[in-house]
């Protein structure tokens, strides 16, 4: 297991810089030259793979309204056999052709709330439906509930309870499907004697996208994306912001009410997070959220395999130093930075355990 890793695209000179800053692992789209230069410096190289990438809309997800789409514009259904085959052959190709230390799975999940409910309320394709049948989940009923929520909202509390019950079985189904994919890749990387890691959603949100921490505990390392600020999917503030926006529509409530409710569920209230969606998305959450999430992760997975990814962009060096110190107090002994840039050298210098 590495101690200090960093995501990015690196030149030979960049590798020298990160080596001097004490980083011992890089996460990137590896090439022969990069692997060779990194090895000379004693830096480990992990190839990152966006798991369900495809350009073919036929391999996309089917949402509750019956539309077929590629989530995030470039990803297919995790249960589609062609998509799964594509991932396995990509992993195998990397291991057969590059002397990397391992691979890291990114996007190893179903669509998230951050993509909006049009993407999130999926997938009901034929592959998912037949898999659900085998696993004894009634996802046709889930689809009916979602369709009704989208069209008519959640008017009565009885409707809400029924919906929650259906949604929780749907979340469990998605977790089991992702576990199946992870297990098949684990087997493959073992054959090649390489490490396997995954960048996964923060523990408070991971079940929403089909990622149970127990599934990933079998891997060599887990990188919880504890991004407290950022303007895209997987960032905690962004995911909560879009989720709140969508819930406002179906519940007919004010955004401050919905946000307060979500913060109460996540135990964020005492941190006084923003009560306006726009502020939450543009300014982010207080950095204390990172410690809350990492502490939760240590209860769900072995600390020896955890390497939280700290989002250093837009955060000043003093705060990064404080975060590093607090993570050390939580018993964390590996960290990963997102992501490399020469402009971020002050932040990278103080990121240490
Ligand atoms: Zn599907």
Image (cartoon, grey):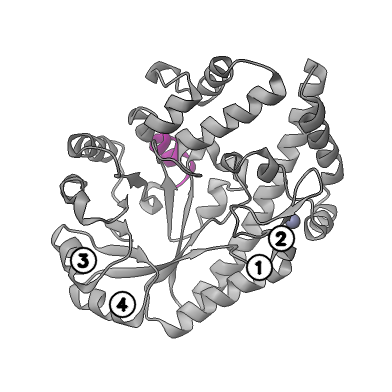
Contact flag, marks 1 and 2 (Cβ < 8 Å): yes
* Mark before the other along the chain sequence, 3 or 1: 3
* Mark before the other along the chain sequence, 3 or 2: 3
What residue does disc 1 label? 84
| Vertical placement of residue 233 versus 92, above or below | above
> In x, y percent, where is residue 306?
39, 50
Mark number, residue 14: 3
Q: Nearer the viewer, residue 91 or 1?
A: 91
Contact flag, marks 3 and 2 (Cβ < 8 Å): no
Side (left or right) of 139 relative to 70: right
* Mark before the other along the chain sequence, 4 or 3: 3
In magenta stretch: residue 298: yes
**In the image, the residue with mark 2 has its CB under 8 Å from the nearest atom of ligand 1:** yes
Spatial separation of the CA atoms under disc 4 and disc 1 = 27 Å
User: Dividing the picture into quarters, in which one does residue 153 lie?
Assistant: top right
What residue does disc 2 label? 79
Residue drawn at (48%, 20%) of the image: 276
What residue does disc 4 label? 35
Mark number, residue 47: none
Q: Which residues are magenta?
A: 292-301
Task: Name the quadrant of the N terminus.
Answer: bottom left
* Mark before the other along the chain sequence, 2 or 4: 4
């Amino acid at each position: 297991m590495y101690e200090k890793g960093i995501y990015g695209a690196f030149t030979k000179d960049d590798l020298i810089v990160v080596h001097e800053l004490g980083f011992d692992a890089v996460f990137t789209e590896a090439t022969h030259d990069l692997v060779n230069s990194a090895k000379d410096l004693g830096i480990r190289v992990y190839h990152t793979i966006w798991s369900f990438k495809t350009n073919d809309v036929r391999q996309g997800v089917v949402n509750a309204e019956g539309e077929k789409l590629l989530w995030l514009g470039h990803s297919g259904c995790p249960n589609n056999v062609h998509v799964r085959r594509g991932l396995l052959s990509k992993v195998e190709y990397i291991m057969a052709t590059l002397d990397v230390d391992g691979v890291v799975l990114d996007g190893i999940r179903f669509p998230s709330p951050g993509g909006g409910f049009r993407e999130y309320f999926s997938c009901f394709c034929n592959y998912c439906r037949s898999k659900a049948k085998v696993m004894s989940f009634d996802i046709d009923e889930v689809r009916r509930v979602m369709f009704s929520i989208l069209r008519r909202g959640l008017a009565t509390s009885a409707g809400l309870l029924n919906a929650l019950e259906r949604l929780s079985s749907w979340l469990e189904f998605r977790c089991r499907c992702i576990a199946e994919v992870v297990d098949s890749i684990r087997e493959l990387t073992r054959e090649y004697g390489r490490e396997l890691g995954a960048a996964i959603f923060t523990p408070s949100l991971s079940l929403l996208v089909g990622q149970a921490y127990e599934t990933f505990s079998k891997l060599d390392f887990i990188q919880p994306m504890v991004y407290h600020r950022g303007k895209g999917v997987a960032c905690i503030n962004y995911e909560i912001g879009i989720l709140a926006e969508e819930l406002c529509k179906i519940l007919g409530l004010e955004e401050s009410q919905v946000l307060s409710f979500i913060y109460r569920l996540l135990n964020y209230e005492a941190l006084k997070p923003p009560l306006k969606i726009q502020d939450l998305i543009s300014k982010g959450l207080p950095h204390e959220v990172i410690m809350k999430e990492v502490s939760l992760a240590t209860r769900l997975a072995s600390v020896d395999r955890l390497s939280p990814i700290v989002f250093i962009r837009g955060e000043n060096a003093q705060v990064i130093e404080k975060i590093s110190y607090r993570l050390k107090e939580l018993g964390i002994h590996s960290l990963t930075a997102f992501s490399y840039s020469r402009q971020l050298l002050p932040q990278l210098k103080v990121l240490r355990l």
